[in-house]
Image: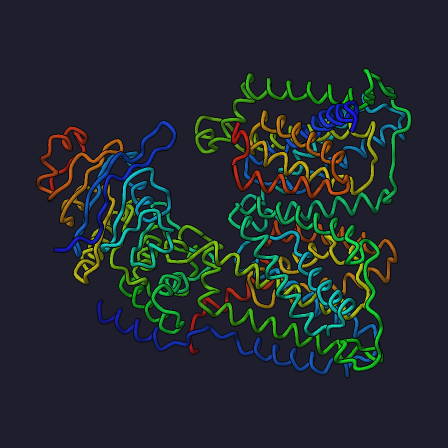
Amino acid sequence: MSRDLIIQAIVSGILMGLIYALVAVGLSLIFGLMEIVNFAHGEFLMLAMFAAFWFWALAGLDPLLSLPFVAAILALAGVVVHFGIIRPLLKAPMLAQVCGTFGLAVALRAMAQFLWTPDFRTITNPWIAGRVQIGGIFIGQPQLMAGAICLLSFVALWLFVTRTETGLGLQATAQDRQAAAVMGIPTERMFALGWAIGLGCVGVAGTLLSTFFYIFPDVGVNFALLAFVTVALGGFGSILGSLVAGLLIGLVESLGGLLLDPSYKTVIVFGLYLAVVIVRPNGLFGRF
Amino acid sequence: MSMLLDVKGVTKRYGGLTANADITFDVNQGEILGIIGPNGAGKSTLFDLITGFQPLDAGRVFFDGHEITGMRPDRIASRGVARTFQKLKPFPDLTVTENVIVGALVRTGDMKQARDHALEALAFTDLLEKRNHFARELSTGQRKRLELARGLAMKPRMILMDEVTGGVDQRTIPGLVDLVLELKRQGVTIVTIEHNMQVMMRISDRILALYAGRRIAFGKPEDVRQDPAVVDAYLGTTTHAA
Amino acid sequence: MASDRARMLEAARSERLWPRPPLWAIGLGIAGAAFLLAYPFLFKTPFSHHLMILILLYALMAQSWNVVAGLSGQISLGHAIFFGIGAYSSTVLFIKFGITPWIGLLVGMAISALAAIAIGVPTLRLRGHYFAIATLLIGSSVQIIVQRWDWVGAASGLYIPINRTSPWYYLQFHTSKVPYYYLALGAAALAYLVVWRIQRSRFGFRLQALRDEPDAAASLGIAVARHKVMAFMISAAMMSVAGTFYGQYVLVLDPERLLSADISIFVLLMTVLGGSGTLFGPALGAAILIPLSEYSRIWFGGTGRTIDLIIYGLLILAVCIWRPSGILSLFEERIRRRGGRTS
């Protein structure tokens, strides 16, 4: 096993990990706010990827250009989902909450398959393409760009949540929604904002993924599983946790695939999930 | 009188906060022990530690001569220790009778017998009329009585009551007090956390006073009431018994 | 006052122990049972037999999910695992060692129960969402592992060799589906009887208690963790029976189908739709959704499966938003409100 291969695996693991982290942070935020696990998270990622694809295929927009649009569309979808689906579900027992978003996931996946067929699609000539060579290592430029934008998004999110008044309102609602409401922080609006940000992040991640990943209706399934593990590992409600955990998962997946059988990736990740939730139920960083 | 519950040096810490610090007391068979203290004094935590819902950091608990420190809550319950919760926990999707049957099932595996014991407990707490209603439909006062009935159907030797008169209509308090006294007459040992000083002074055989996680007084009501530490902690909140 | 209470107590004690459904419901039940018994003689086509066999099979599987999720509140999103264990156990034992599927059935149940313990002990003490995620991950992992495990046929699966002698020994019937029908009916009836008994037992009451309020349950002497695992085991064993039966029915084991998320989704949907925690909810859900599924496949061909799933997904969502306790919950609740009144 050459040193270069290992470094290659580490680098690509980190870059993928940044994407996992951005996907996971949305999930984490939503759960931190209202204790609902969005089982349809992966499907929204898939929709974002398709949105970027169609912007490219039909309007010729490079994903980097359509990024703000896709993010905005997903954020809007988040608000709609909150008011249309989540608000009633919050009053229902846990069985209904789990099965509700699960049902949404099934429906979205099937709808995508119905509308766009199970065919794999790619964006064939994005602006940022090709590879960069550093020493004996090759890094895809789209992956590099994706990693950079993910990191930027994290910084932006962190600043928003910790430095702005609205962001602090989010934190307050997540920690104690009744106390926050008493202090004039509108719970409903915070929830909707949480969904908007959560799915907005997914929108960004999805657009970035579309520049180098296959796009197909079931693509969200595996990402969702990885996102669940990432959030469990990082701690529901923690932004920093999602980042660290995402990087860890990316590394484990990449190195695991290199050193062991790549087709057992899910099994390895599952083992990690189990180890984490049993040993440290609150994850690495617990709440915000 | 023989000692039924023996609590020695019980301590519980949460990070930097000490919820219970080295608390020692005992409860005799057939008596009513009242536990008083301001909010945050550690009363409910003490219940959790005794009944196994939280692990202790130090100390030991003995029930009926046997050590129950660190036992699982269901094992402690099977030994005859019932408890109610401050935040009421009725089984919402079961009827009132079914709720109480769950309690009765501690003592018997026969469903008919369990049902009959449940009905007795419901008669005792005056809930027979509502017996086929679903628990989620009850008022707060009725839910308190349901929790009590559920615990009583266990035919416990001792019952720990957490704020039985809390949050209920003033008019229903005398009825609840009568229930508690009747329980004592039937030989059940009672430990009760209470805010209502009048009730406390009236029914308790002994009182344990807690403040900031520590025991500041323990003894007969008259003595505790005049204890300078208690007066100090409660300045302005003690009322004379009617 | 006290004598009023005494009289009320006496009246209450003399009531029936278990509430009785209204007469019309009992009548409907008897008619339904008669219909099921006579079905193969009322409808003669292989397709109508196949349809009903599937309904009965799924009614059994949905009831299995009902035990773990409806009665004890643990949401399993990967229940197909036990279906697969049942199918593979009996098939592998038969193909490799020539053991009759009847024994294979029992072995499958045992292995499923053990798997339930292995999975359940570490995961059932997690909070509901964490457990659901864990089952999702395990379901996915098991499918991946089986698809790469040569001893059980890997991705190409297993074929049960056709044997036309001794159909009852080999559990293969080639001239007619009718024996399969009665076997399915028998298995489903047995499962429903078991759940009916559980609902009226100390075990069943304790499960429902820990489902709603685990702390209160513990304070009432219920060993919460142990009961959850037991419910999971029972559920797994039931699911396994369905798996063994299905293997013998189609004679082909395809891990893509057998361990797929679709099965986990179907049993979940049927129970939630029909009424989780009720006795006949799972059966109602199966009776509604299987014909829907089969007919949409006929009408829409290949895309039928996709349209199915769109409808199912939206249906689960709608039920969870508007009537989370399902169709029959209202009915069974009304019965319980009547209590043991003899009138």
- Decide if residue B69 is in sight here: yes
Q: Is residue B181 left or right of residue C68?
A: left
Depth check, front residue: B58 or B123 = B58
Q: Residue at x 53, y 46 (%)?
A: C126
Q: Residue at x 39, y 72 (%)?
A: B110
Q: Residue at x 79, y 23 (%)?
A: A4
The colour mode here is rainbow
The number of callouts visible is 0
Depth check, front residue: C142 or C47 = C142
- Decide if residue A200 is in sight here: no
**Where in the figure is residue C269, as x and y percent of width and height?**
67, 56
Return the residue found at the far front.
A1
Q: Quadrant of residue C263?
A: bottom right
Q: Quadrant of residue A259?
A: top right
**Where in the figure is residue C22, as x and y percent of width and height?**
52, 75
**Where in the figure is residue C88, as x and y percent of width and height?**
73, 62
**Where in the figure is residue C107, as x and y percent of width and height?**
65, 67
B110 over A251 or under it: above or below: below
Q: Quadrant of residue A123?
A: top right
Q: Is residue B80 left or right of residue A213?
A: left
Depth check, front residue: B64 or A83 = B64
Image quadrant where one finds the C terminus of chain C: bottom left
Q: Residue at x 68, y 75 (%)?
A: C185
Depth check, front residue: B34 or A18 = A18
Image quadrant where one finds the N terminus of chain C: bottom left
